[in-house]
Amino acid sequence: MKPSALARVGLGLLAILVASLITAVTFGPADISPIEVWQTIGYHFGLLPESPVSVLRDAIIWELRLPRVLTAAAVGSGLALCGAVMQALTRNPLADPYLLGLSSGASLGAVSFLLLGASLMMPLGAFLGAGAAMALTLLVTQLLGGATPTRAILAGISISALAAAGTSLLIFWSATGDSYREILSWLMGSLSGVVWSEALLVIAALVVAGVPVLFSGRSLDAFAFGDTAAAALGVDVDRLRWLLLGGTALLTGILVSIGGAIGFVGLIIPHLTRLLTGSRHRVLLPVAMLIGAIFMVWTDTAARSLFAPRELPVGIITALLGAPIFLLVLLRYRRIT
């Protein structure tokens, strides 16, 4: 694809994302128009001297819906980025934060801190859990005889199962009454009740951990030829691998601490993006982030709208959409190997 065509694709996706954000805010029991959304945003950013929207509708837009929609976009963008990076580092098309154990490890860390009464430190617990899961996955991979795509996935699945079992045990042992239902809903992926402080935390994590990763596209392209070839091309393989794995573990931990273990986004979005852009990571990474953001905005909107007033955990919808695509990737991967 030519640079001019890629620029048009990027601008088009950005326009779709902005339109999706505004439209998604209008979904809900209160009948709100896109104009009211723009007016509310303009008022809170100081572009309008006074709000033409009533106080109640202003609160619905600014305090309830906008933080949630922005968080959904940031979570989708971050998970897509982490999935694309892990697939490049492991040279495995099946890699994503969920299959490599990061999401389950982050869930275990977050639930541990939550049940200990340190709910404000859940992001730290999720990061520690994700980092521990990543370290264990790499250790098991080495014990199996060295890093190969298949070994990395098998090790990740085993660590993911172990962390999930630990999380279930903690919940079974400690949670009571309504907290059991709330934790279970969060583990299945839910953005219900997100407030501005959580939205800003996710966006900040995406900027701090995600933006530097975007500049690693040329090095990730070198990883596609193997570690030896990447080193010959001037890439400090070990240092870059640990930096990228640490960055993705940090980002995954914070995303999971806010949105729960939302599966399949990091797996399917990079594959869908490659159909549009090809495999060059300098292009793939930013486009995957845009598509991931759009995808999560609409899956979260569907989760809270399809069966209103009841709300589905968004992880159920991403699994329903992602599982068939995962099977297609498995079949394609089998033919390649």
Image: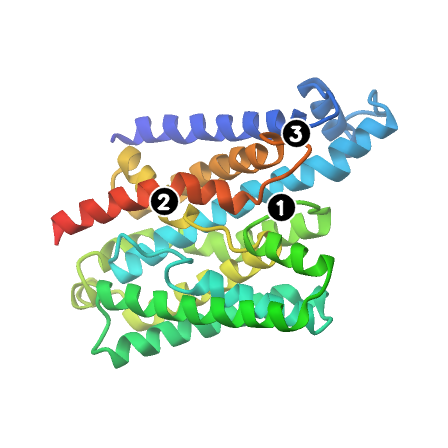
Q: What is the quadrant of residue 60 in the picture?
A: top right
Badge 2 element: helix
Residue 323 numbered tag: 2
For the rendered model, the colour scheme is: rainbow
On screen, residue 165 versus residue 240, left or right, reads right
Check disc 1 and report the residue beneath it.
Answer: 191
Residue 124 % position (x, y): 61, 68
How many angstroms separate mark 1 from mark 3 (CA)? 14 Å
Disc 1 residue type (three-letter): Leu
Say which residue appears at 76% left-offset and 39% top-offset.
Answer: 63
Label 3 crowd (10 A; few <14 / some 14-19 / many >=20) = many
Q: Quadrant of the N terminus?
A: top left
Mark 2 and mark 1 lie on one chain; the one further toward the N terminus is: 1
Seen in the picture, residue 90 relative to 138 is either above or below; the reply is above
Q: Residue at x 23, y 63 (%)?
A: 149
Q: Secondary structure at mark 3?
A: helix
Q: Earlier in the sequence, mark 1 or mark 3?
A: 3
User: Label 2, label 3: how many angstroms apart (C-alpha)?
Assistant: 28 Å
- The residue closer to the viewer here, 94 or 83, is 94
12 vs 313, left or right, is left
**Residue 239 placed where, x, y %?**
35, 72
Q: Which mark is residue 25?
A: 3
Q: Earlier in the sequence, mark 2 or mark 3?
A: 3
In the rendered structure, which amino acid carries the disc numbered 2? Ala
Of the residues shown, which amino acid type is indicated by label 3? Val
- Give the image location of residue 49, x and y in percent: 85, 25
Residue 303 location, x and y as percent? 57, 37
In depth, the one of 201 and 107 nearer the eye is 107
The residue at the far bottom in this view is 143
Q: Which residue is depicted at the point 24% across and 49% down?
A: 330
- Front residue of 248/317: it is 317
